[in-house]
Image: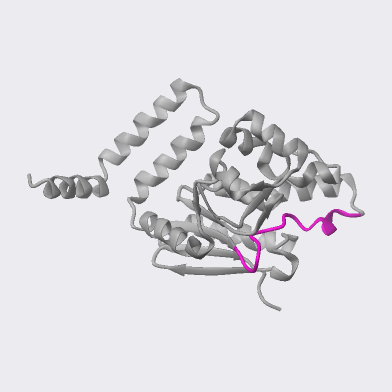
Amino acid sequence: MPDKLLIDLQDGVLTLTLNRPDRLNAIDIEMLDMLVGALEDGKKNDSVGVIVLKGAGRVFCAGADIGQMIDRTPADWQEIVDHYLDPIRLIASIEKPIIARCHGDVVGGGLGLCLACDFRVGALDSRYCTPFINLGLAGCDMSSGYYLPRLIGMGRATDMMMTGRFVDAREAFEIGLLSRLVNENELDDAVMSLARTFASGPTGALGFTKSAIRRSMDNDIGGEFDYEIFAQVQCLQSEAHRERVAAFFEKRGR
């Protein structure tokens, strides 16, 4: 049986591929554990500059494998639902850019993973849905209640979460759910071009930038400004900053 998560590291780009195409990449506990482990390794590995998350087959991900939620006790449900949030927590904590490569259906827990990423590059054939309400579940599952209002606004998030409707790629891009929108045959090139840009650094500055953006969602303005000052002082002392400033002035002929 093939691995449910494929892991590939090349030139600083760590690619994690959800690999249950026969089940539309539905995330079961085994895949979930593998994803958490791979993200933890990527967080610690200094040779990883950027992480790409993608799905095998014709869709990105159909969400959590709901078959694992049947005939459980409330205590079981508490543990499982919390565990499904572990990769979301990790994505937020990793001070490296993380890119979601979105194609086909991006649904439920699959959408939750994408929302947590720093960039969502989508193909024109992709579509997005938080279907929980249609299953008699709260529409805020798998981090959508946290990220969707922050990314697309409360009104649009309410529409998606309370109706469970599909949003096509063009609408997703227009409302800010997608960072980039490309033709299907351009998706891989667009994702890898972005990934290679980040893999070349500056690693420290990118990490501080990601942290500042994440903190701003919950911090007051004073706390955010304090962090900005700290981050810039660290970057100003870095070799990467000195090299890039030197290159900038050299390009200008000074």
Quadrant housing the N terminus: bottom right
Q: Residue at x 75, y 66 (%)?
A: 23
Q: Looking at this view, is 85 or 46 the one in front?
A: 85
Verify whether residue 191 appears in magenta: no
Overall secondary structure of the magenta section: loop
To which quarter of the image does residue 103 belong? bottom right
Instruction: Tell me if I can see residue 184 in this picture.
Output: yes
Q: Residue at x 65, y 52 (%)?
A: 127
Q: Residue at x 78, y 44 (%)?
A: 132
Q: Looking at this view, is 252 or 169 the one in front?
A: 169
Of all residues shown, which one is farthest toward the bottom?
A: 1
**Residue 97 position within the rendered picture, expressed as x and y whole percent measured from the top left:** 46, 50
**Residue 143 position within the rendered picture, expressed as x and y whole percent measured from the top left:** 67, 42
**Residue 245 position within the rendered picture, expressed as x and y whole percent measured from the top left:** 19, 44
- Tell whether 198 sits left or right of 26: left
Instruction: Provide the residue span drawn in magenta.
Output: 55-70
To which quarter of the image does residue 249 belong? top left
**Residue 170 position within the rendered picture, expressed as x and y whole percent measured from the top left:** 57, 47
Instruction: Tell me if I can see residue 86 in this picture.
Output: no
Asked if residue 7 is positioned above or below residue 71 in the image, the reply reads below
